[in-house]
Amino acid sequence: MQNAAPASLNSKMRVDPSRILNTLVNNLNGMVYRCHHDTEWSMLFVSQGCYELTGYHAEEFLAQDGISYEQITHPDDRERVRDEINLAIQGGRRFTVHYRILCKDGQVKWVHESGMCVQDELGIPVIEGFMEDETQSMQMMEALENAEHYYRNLVENISVGIFQTSLEGKYLAANPALARIYGYDTAQELISALSDIGTQLYVEEGRRDEFRYQMQQNGEVANFESEVYRCDGSKIWISENAHVVRDVTGRFICYEGTVHDVTERKHHQALLERQANFDALTGLLNRNMLHKLLDQSIARSERLGYFLAVVFVDLDNFKIINDSLGHAAGDTLLVEVAARLKNCLRSTDIVVRQGGDEFVLVLNDHYRVQSVIGLLKRVLAEVGRPVNLSGREFQVGASLGVAMYPADGGDTMTLLKHADAAMYAAKNKGRNNFQFYTRELNRMADERLNLERAMRLALERDEFEPFFQPKVDAEKRIVGVEALARWDSAEWGMIPPDKFIALAEETGMIAALTDMILGKAFRQVAHWRAQQWPLQLAVNLSPKLFLKGGLPEHLSALARHAGLPQECIELEITENLFLGDDEQALQKLCDLKDAGFQLAMDDFGTGYSSLSYLRRFPLDIIKIDRSLVTGIEHEEEVAKIARAVISLGASLGKTVVAEGVENQAQFDYLRQQGCDEFQGYLFARPLHHEAMSALLLES
Ligand code: C2E
Ligand code: CA
Ligand code: CA
């Protein structure tokens, strides 16, 4: 070819510019054109690129009846395109327009066109220009715009707080949700109000430093939970997830992340933890914590060489107070006792509410038994101080059982078991005292279990029966008998009631036991009455039974069945029953009275007696406790009290009975003072019914 000239020739001289132009024009990715400035944009020249752009061949534009460029311009854009081009031409400027064309295949494409008005070779004005496909970039732009819109919306409307902050702790950006979480009206307010996150936002000092430290170490923080101040000064808990944003060169730009308000969860969690580890009533640690803490204490003792004491504390008479005064009073008592226990121990010691009226103390760091004893004495004294319940003062004792580490056990379970056993020993010792654990105590605990088993068997075998102790008048004539329970055990012989009544009450066997005793006593006395001995019968009623409903009907049925009139039956009830001084107790007494029974207050003078009971309650008989009779002949004080009680009873029209009369001097004194009836070893011990029958025959 002609223009493929050897390189050695002067190439500059040989260049054909129109040829180069031709090549360029036809290979451009787009379309070069020349057209008339007329209504059809009639084409004078179009480059080859027009096919790719529009789908029409160049010839189709140039032919007489071919396609016009106006025709392929999108109808919606035609006017605008013409206006813009005209405006540029009038101003003698180049023009640039974006618009849509309709391709031959129906496709719509965005084109970018630029050109200007020039004069052709003959001096006629024509337009020359270039247009190219920009559909793709337009689509990308559109997608970008959509995306931006979408993300902006998301950030604005999402409920999660979003932020960007500077290294120094200023806000660069925040979304409305963050403003809401922190209590500001708008994000802008938040950004301008919080100029130092470290001091203004976080409650805990150094929290921002921790945030930055973690960022430095990991480039991010995850579930970073902190307490923060809201705009109004209130505090909430938040959880942050954030990361470092860097530019392409790795330079720090900002921290960016999200904030969740987790206050509710935090509170819930705290509540659950409290519930799991603390006793709701007293606020003390609960039994769940006991094992863990005791394990720790043992490890500590082991390390330091001190010993520790595990103390089981059980309140004496709590059940009586709770049953008679009501649960609210019981709760008050427990709260008070908990506070006192805490008060008299050292901060290193642990107080746990084990449940019910049981507490466990862990006394750490002792090196002498004496110091433990000192503490225990203090505990007893504190718990024993009067407590005000329902407007009255009560004294509540406690029974304490102590197991020492390491002597009494090497692990938590053993220590607790042994402290518990020691506590039972304290109870059996007469309450309101403490007992240390020994092997002997363990044996006693076992015995208790055996006893319970044996009692159940004894009920089945009908081994319980009443003994009868006579009551005499001032002339020593037998006027009645008191039925006292005895257990005639095949295994152990005759067992007195103080060995089994309490256990029967604790285990619920008391109801069956009472039925057995009362049934037999009723029948026996009915029999004696039939033989011309007009005896009264006194029976003992556990407060436990009294508090259950339906007692009058039940007792009446028993009496009827035995053929013994209710008027001959005296129901002995201990003072403890009257503790509550409440309407309920009064009502129950009235019900029994209405059923025809006589009512007696047993053991008068021992408990929390209030003389007002004597007036208010429908009692017929007062039994002066043995402790007020014993020593009456030597002790002026005792004698005075006995005298006062007798005259009081008499003035209220009650029958006064003295129990535990052991000698003539006591009998003489009491008789002198106007006591009505007498009971005691001086006249007879409790007797088997055969011996009693013999005694009756003698009299
Ligand atoms: P209590 O009702 O005060 O019965 C009087 C207790 O004093 C009886 O003891 C009796 O044997 C004892 N006693 C009587 N006279 C004298 C005396 O002159 N000197 C001395 N030192 N003691 C005397 P007991 O039979 O061992 O009964 C003890 C307690 O067991 C009774 O005290 C009563 O509270 C309870 N109890 C006995 N039987 C029953 C029963 O069937 N049901 C219930 N719930 N309790 C019962
Ligand atoms: Ca009695
Ligand atoms: Ca008594």
Image (cartoon, rainbow, N blue to C red):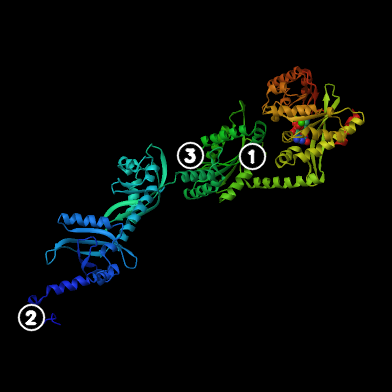
Count how many numbered circles sit on residues in the image. 3
Numbered disc 3: secondary structure: loop
Residue 46 placement (x, y as % from top left): 22, 69
- Mark 1 and mark 2 residues within 8 Å of each other at the beta carbon: no
Image coords of residue 144 (percent x, y) = 32, 57
Residue carrying label 2 = 9
Q: Which image quarter holds the C terminus?
A: top right
Expressed as whole percent of the image width and height from the top left, the position of residue 222 reads 39, 53
Q: Residues within 10 Å of mark 2 (few under 14, many from 20)?
A: few
If the image is split into quadrants, where does the N terminus sit? bottom left
| Residue matched to label 3 | 347
- Of badges 2 and 3, nearer the viewer stands 2
Identified at 78% across, 26% down, the residue is: 663
Q: Is residue 601 visible?
A: no
Q: Which residue is mark 1?
A: 426
Q: Earlier in the sequence, mark 1 or mark 2?
A: 2
